[in-house]
Image (cartoon, grey):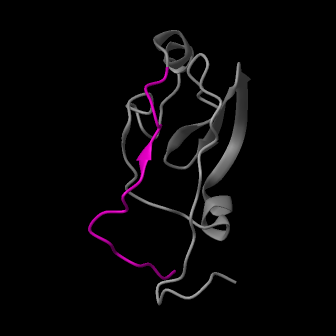
């Protein structure tokens, strides 16, 4: 496995705090990130090849959020819109040398 270390990725997720009634739905799970409901810096980006090796049996859907069991704990993902906020997140991808991604 190869990696690229950067001091800071410059991505904050989630964009805004997850409502307490939505984050409390997952309190019985051992979460990979217990602070998933609070905006904070992204520490690590994983490609699909690595991600698929981390997945374990277990998927739970509640509202607009999904919990996926992984070897590092349950990960939470899905839509986190504030009332009236319908702007999608954007993603920029590039290679280490600055050329266009394949």
Q: Position of residue 96 (x, y in %)?
A: 47, 84
Task: Examine the rendered structure and indicate whether residue 63 appears above or below residue 49.
Answer: above
Magenta region includes residue 7: yes
Q: Quadrant of the C terminus?
A: bottom right
Identity of the residue furthest to the left in this view: 7
Residue at image coords 41%, 53%: 11
Left or right: where does residue 18 sit relative to residue 88? left
- Name above or below for residue 20 compared with residue 75: above
Where 96 falls versus 9 (above or below)?
below
Instruction: Determine the residue positioned at 72% across, 42% down.
Output: 57
> Where residue 69 sits: x, y (%)?
62, 40
Q: Quadrant of residue 60?
A: top right
In the image, residue 66 sits, relative to residue 73, either above or below, namely above
What's the magenta region?
1-18
Q: Position of residue 77 (x, y in %)?
A: 61, 37
- Residue at 67 percent across and 65 percent down: it is 48
Residue furthest out toward the top: 21
Residue 14 spot, x, y in % from top left: 47, 37
């Amino acid at each position: 496995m190869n990696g690229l270390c950067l001091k800071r990725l410059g991505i904050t997720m989630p964009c805004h705090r997850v409502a307490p009634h939505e984050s409390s739905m997952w309190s019985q799970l051992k979460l990979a990130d217990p602070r998933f409901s609070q905006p904070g810096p992204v520490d690590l980006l994983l490609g699909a090849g690595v991600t698929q090796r981390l997945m374990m049996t277990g998927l739970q859907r509640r509202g607009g959020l999904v919990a996926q069991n992984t070897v590092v704990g349950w990960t939470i993902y899905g839509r986190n819109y504030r009332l009236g906020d319908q702007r999608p997140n954007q993603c920029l991808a590039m290679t280490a040398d600055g050329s266009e991604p394949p």
